[in-house]
Every structure is written in structure tokens, then in C-alpha cells.
Image: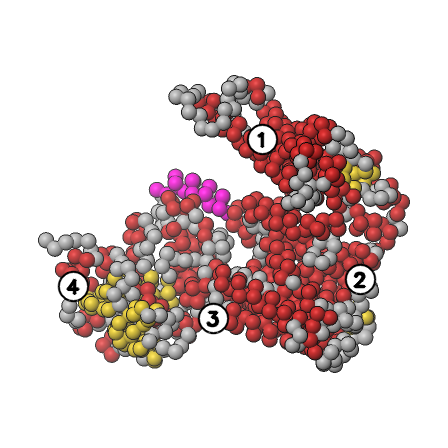
Amino acid sequence: MTATVPPATPTSGVPAEPAPAPTRGALDQDWRRLVRMGAVGAVAQIFIALSNMPVRLDERVIVKPVLSLGYLTLLIVPFAAGHRVGHQIKREGVPVHAAGAHEVAGGAACGALAGGGLSLLAVLLANFDLREPLVNWSPMLAELLAFGNETWFAVVVWLVIGTACGAAGGALRLLGPRTRRAVVTMALAVGGAAVLEPLVVDLAEGMRLEALTDRLYARRGGVNWTSGLGLAAASGILAALGRGRLQQARAHIAELEGASRTRTNGLLILATAAVLVILPLFAGKLTNELLANVGLFVLLALGLNIVVGLAGILDLGYVAFFAVGSYSAAVLTAATSPRINPELPWLVALIVVVVITGLVGLFIGAPVIRMRGDYLAIVTLGFGEIIRLIFLSDWLSGWFGGSQGITKIPGAGIFGLTDVAGTDPRRVFYLVLAFCAIAIYVSWRLERSRLGRAWMAVREDETVAEAMGINTVNVKLLAFVVGAVLGSFSGAIFSAKVGSVFPNSFLILVSIVILVVVIFGGMGNIVGVIAGSAVLIGVLGGPKQPGLLAEFSEFKLLIYGALLIWMMLARPEGLIPSVRRSRELHQQEMAQDAWLKGQVEDDNHNDGGSPKAAPAT
Amino acid sequence: MKPRRAEATPRIAGHAVGLAHPEVLGTDPRIAKPLLEMRSVNAHYGAVHALRDVNLSIFEGELVCLLGGNASGKSTTLKTLLGMLKPTSGEVVLDGEVVNDKPTSFRVARGVTMVPENRRLFKRLSVRENLDLGAYLRTDTDGIAADLERIFELFPRVKERLGQKAGTLSGGEQQMVAMGRALMAKPRVLLMDEPSMGLAPALVQQNFELIQQIHEAGLTVFMVEQNANMALSIADRGWVLQTGRVVLDDSAENLLAHPDLRASYLGQADD
């Protein structure tokens, strides 16, 4: 790309020359895109470096001894910028030669700019002390950037690394689909092995396969580089041999209809259930704990999904129902509960909890539900805090223990058969799994019911829904109550699992995290919600629970935010778009094709519908 | 400005396709009571007096229209008829029963159905789901299935698009689905809010033909329109609403010929 551009081109600003050659104008555009992307990359790099992520995450090794999670955070931006800019360079008016070279070159230039941000930062770090406003302006960062060498080394090395990453990002575009699939699979295999390390080690111990993990992982964490290479090679070969059969199979399943569709779905669900039932038997404490945490959030997210995803009520105070569920279960089962302590068996208490939470849902919902949109969101936010503050208040501390909370809550005993205490994560997980299964079934049935349809109608257009004869207030209230009850399940299990409840376990942050899980996974979509919980809670960690990347806990919210922004830009329909929505997009294309064909056929049969208006929607 | 009650004789359609209640056919027009009626209704939005002593009566089998400019109270009239707005005084009468305190669902269940302006389909739901929602209050599975078949007969296009999102349809197709959705409620009287709004001229024509067709099949239609010319060309009679007051109540021909109306709504100055 650089070769074809006259040296005078990168003059910034709008070309004011009286008669610029058309190609030059177009190339100017290219340059501007490249510089802009590079500048954004540089700023992002500096931001990441100053967020202290590289320093804090340096301890977590991805590939030993080459790459740590900390350094990885600094490689992503130049790579992504390089990959992205290749798409933006149009080279209008330039005859095509050396196909693809401009993508690598553009990527490299862009990556160099992004890397240059770090070079600049290294120089600044060496010469100024801005520790006062920027707490992470530390010698540690300077040392990390320079790999323990002088500043000049940092300057050079980050330019080189940025260029390499950018070029690699650009080059990724040039690969054929097969090679690209292999490369992506290799990266995913090694990255996945590193991220899932605690899980894999835990499982391997349970299955007496320590020999395998000892070989794969270094003693102090991270994939050994030799076995990493082996893993990459193996997965690459598998991907090349597979030739995307997996994708074909998925597409094939997606196209199935009727009975065979139901059968395949049934088999898939059965297989997943079997894995989830058998897996914990081999898993140790860590895995089960993690799975139980994910499960608790799946429960919460499924409940919120009914409220937000189906009925379209933006509830920002969902944590209130989690809190009410936890507290009422604690009061009913714990002997240490200050005022009332009936010490009911857990399962009996659960029934009472469901009734109480349902009533609270009704009580909060009744005034809230008459509002719409923003007002409703703000009011629910308020109620979420009010509930927490009620539990915290001195006024009711005689009932709920105030800030001391309620402790020594017994585990969940079921028919006297098992006693699910927090000390046995496996049993907790099975309990959570059972309730998740119930919640999934309920959500699934509701979505296809008359009530579910009414919820969706209210979500789409409340006024028209009312005109159809739907009692919108009742229907919305019902969504609120059903969501509340699902949340209370999670709360009751939570209190039995943890053994204590405090008002500060129910901060507004929990509401936000649940909402993020629902949005991230795909609103109104059960599988998406589960996937969202697995990724966000399982990998990054929940409000108080560490995930697989426990080091991330400090930056969790930052990453949530970044993920949400990326999601809204790239995949507004969520991680796993519901079949409904992808079908919609697919059909939109088909409709447009049909419209193009229709133009020809329209003379033959004009039975209504202006063809001109067809693709406008 | 002379109200002519004689013109209000209901017209009974000859060939019903079964969308309206079959009892209609046996009714003697002269002793027919109004199906839906407003008796000196006043309505307010807060301090705004939106309807002033409005009297309307819609007889079984009629095609009538309510004309008026922006903010004249047309949509308010519809909302009041449907029960989404409570009148401050006066009575809304359905089948001889005062329904002021009955909710929308009650009236919908008794055959008052609205086609909202701009069609307002549930865009992210499929055509099928939209149609099903039209029949939300019905429980007669067989009747629903039969009506669905009739709608497919009426609009073959709708059947082709059944699984598609309503929002991805063309304007004309959306109009068909909106009409189909309303018909799924087994209406006795169809309240149409500005059927010409937001449609290309060719489609407006088509839409009015459709309304006429449905009306001829035996359905009572009450439409609210700004496009007076178009509406009066198919309506039996109409009212003109101005700042919440009914200022004209006459047959369609007389209204079309009325000098005031010609000046203000039909866009033609007096010669």
C-alpha cells in the first residue's frame, strides 16, 4: 500500500488543492482511516496499561514462559486494529497488484501506531511522574513495558510488537477459510486450555489423569510452551481435517423442522443433562463451586429474562427478590434468626419463601407497573435499594440482624435424605441444577404459552396490546411475580449454600450484573442466558464470586463494560441470538431477494403490497 | 349543518362470508338498535377538554366515517369507544348496555376491535403470532382455525409470510396482517384509525377497496380519517369533528357536497 502512495499524500485535513487526482483523494481516505484506527489503538493501549491490568495480570501465565495474561491484554489491541483496518482500506482507483499485500502492510502500520502508544507511554513514564492523578503510573509498569531493560528498549520493542501483531491481524484476512479456521482453532485451543486451567486440573485430579495435566501445565500455572505447541498442532490438524463439519452439522440442525427437530433437540438436551449430572462426580471442590455459582446466576438471569426479555419491563432492582428470598429462607430455617425462628425444614421453608417473594413482587410491582420506560427503570432501581436498606436498618435489626445479618443458616435438607450444606459444593451444585432445570422448563413453557405471547405483545407495543384485549397491567404484574419467584429460588439456595446473609450481599451491583448477563447472552433467549452466565460468571466472576480468571476480579466491571459496548456494536442480538431473531435476519435477506424477483413477476400478479415498500423495513 | 337522521338507516350486506355474526342477516334494519353509541360524551386529558358532548351511533352493517383535522379528537373518540380512556361524562353504549366502566378486554370480547393507525403490528413477532394475538380473548379453537383459513382466502400473501417477522413485511402486506389480526378477534364492528396514514397513494386506494370488501362481507366499519374525499367515497354517512365537537352529521353525498367541508377538508375552495 505504501508503495503506491505518493509521498505528499498524508497531508492531514481536507484536500484543498484545486484539482486532486481522484485516486489520491481516495487514498487520502485510506490514510485517514488508518491513522484514525492507529490513534484509537494507541489511546486504547495507554488506557489499558494505565488501568494496571498488565501489571496485575502478569502473574497469570498463559503460555510458559512466553506469554502472560498481562502481556496478552497489550497484544489484543494492535492485533484487532490491524485486523479491522484491513477491511477499511479500499484503495479506490489503484490497480490490483500483489493481492492482499496492502492488508498486511496496512495492518502493520496500524499496529505500529497502536504499539507506538506504549512506546510513548514508556518514554513518559521514564521522564515524568504523574503518580498523583494516575495511581498506576508506577515503576512496575515501566519495568513491564521495557521487559526489565532500559527505556529505549521499550520504545523499540513495542513498535516491533505492535507492527507484528497488526501485520498478523491484517494477514488473518488473507487466509483461506480452511486455514483461517485452523488458525483460529489453534488459538482457541491454547487460550482455552490456559483459561480453563483450574477447571481442567480439578477434573483431571478427579479422573486420576494428573499425568496429563502435569505435562500440559507448568508447575506454577500456564501451558508449557512445548505442550502448547503440541496442543496447537493437534487442534490445527483436527480443524483442517474437520473441514468445518461442526458448522455444517450445526447449520443442518438449525434447518431441521418438525419431528426430527424435536428429536435432535431432545437428544442435545439429554446429552447436556447427562454431562452436567456426571461431570460433578469427577470434579473437585473448585469446579463444583464454580458450577454452582454459575447455576445460581442462571436461575437469577432466567427470572430476569422473563421480566426484561419477554415482558420488556426494564427492572433494575431485581436483586430485591434475591434478597427477599435469601432473607426469608434464612429467617425460616436458621435457629439464630433474631425474632422468629421456626427452624422449618428447607423444602417447607421454600414454599413459604415463594409465597412471600411472590407477595413482595406483587407489592412492589403494583405501583411500578403502571409506569413505562425510563420511569419504571428508575423506580425499580429505587425499590432494589429500599429492600436492602430495610434489611440493614436499625429499625428492623431485631428481626433481620441489621448489618450483622443472619448467620449459621443450616444447609438445605431434602426429605431428610441429603443435607446440602455449603461445605459440600457437589450437593449444592446438584440442588442448583435441579432448580435450573425447573426454571428452564418453566421459562420454555411460558415462552410458548398464551401468557408468553401476551408478554411479547406488551413488550412490542403496549397500547396495541391493550387494544387487543390484553389486560396489560395484570400481565405485566404476572411477569414481575414470576420473575420474583424464580429469583427467590436462587436466594433460598444462596443462603443455604453460604450459610449466612448480610444486607451487603445484595448491592445494586448484583442487579446490574444479572442484567448484563441477560443482555450479553441475548435477551429473551434461554440458551443465551445460560451461555451468558457461563461466560461472565464462570470465566470473569460474579459480584463476589471469583471466576476461572480470578485475577480479573478487579477489572471485572471494566471488562463487562467493554464487552457490553462491543456487543451493542457488533452483535446487538446477544452472544447466542435466539432462533427467532436470526431467522428474522435471514428472512429479511430472503424477503429482499424475493422482492427483486417480484419486480419481474409483479406484472403478472399484482395481488397487493407495493413492491417498492418491500425492502424498506 | 342539518343532521338528517333518516340517512342513518343501516344497510345490511348481502353476502356474508361469515366474518360477522350471522344473526345480523335476520335483523330488520328499521327496528335495529345502534351497535355502538356515544351519548353526549365529554372526555378530558388532564385539563384539556378533548371531546365535547359527542353523539355518535353506529348501526349494524354500516360503513361510517369520522372526519376531522389534527387534534380534533378523532383518536380520542376511538380510545373512548374502546375503553382505553374513560369519559368524564356521558355514556358509551354497546348493544344497549352502558359500558363506561367496562375495561377494554370486555369490549373486545364483545366484538369491538380496533385497527390502529399506522398498522402498528408487533414487529418482532411473526405474522402467525400477530394473528394469534388478534384472537387473544377467544377460546373457540375451531372458530379461530376457521377464521384463520378465511383470512388466508382473503389475503393469500399472508399465508406465504406466516413465519416471517411482521416488521420485515412491505407496507401493503403489513396492512393485510393488521386487517387480518383485527378480523381474528371475530369483530362485529371494526374501528379503523386513519387507514390511509403512512401508505403510498396506490396502497391507500387498495386499502379502501379492502375496507369496502370487508364491509360488503357483512362487517360494520367505523373509520376515522383525515382524507375526507377517500373516506366519503366508500362510507354511507359520516361526522365531522372540530376541536372535540361534532359539527356535521350527514350522509356521505351531502358531506361531499357541503361547502364548509369542501373548503376545509377536501382542499377545494368555493368556486
Disc 2 target residue? A425
Q: Is residue B98 above or below residue A459?
A: below
Q: Which residues are magenta?
A: A587-603
Proximity of marks 3 and 2: CB atoms separated by less than 8 Å: no
Name the spot of residue A237 as percent of width and height, x first.
75, 35
Q: Amino acid at mark 1?
A: Gly
Identify the residue at horizontal 83%, vertical 52% (top origin): A202
Judged by depth in the image, the label closer to the viewer, 4 or 2, is 2
Q: Amino acid at mark 3?
A: Asn
Name the spot of residue A610 as percent of width and height, x first.
36, 47
Using a 10 Å C-alpha cutoff, classify the residue at mark 1 as few (fewer than 14 neighbours), some (14 to 19) or many (20 or more). Answer: many
Proximity of marks 4 and 2: CB atoms separated by less than 8 Å: no
Front-most of residues A96 and B202: A96
Judged by depth in the image, the label closer to the viewer, 3 or 4, is 3
Report which quarter residue A129 is drawn in: top right
Is B255 contained in the magenta span? no
Rounded to the nearest angstrom, the CA distance separating label 1 from label 3 is 53 Å
Residue at mark 3 shares a chain with residue at mark 4: no
Helix, strand or loop: magenta stretch: helix
Disc 3 target residue? A471
Rounded to the nearest angstrom, the CA distance separating label 4 from label 1 is 70 Å
Query: From where the camera sits, is residue A482 visible?
Result: no
Query: From where the camera sits, is residue A126 visible?
Result: yes
Identify the residue at horizontal 79%, vertical 47% (top origin): A197
Disc 4 target residue? B254
Using a 10 Å C-alpha cutoff, classify the residue at mark 3 as few (fewer than 14 neighbours), some (14 to 19) or many (20 or more). Answer: some
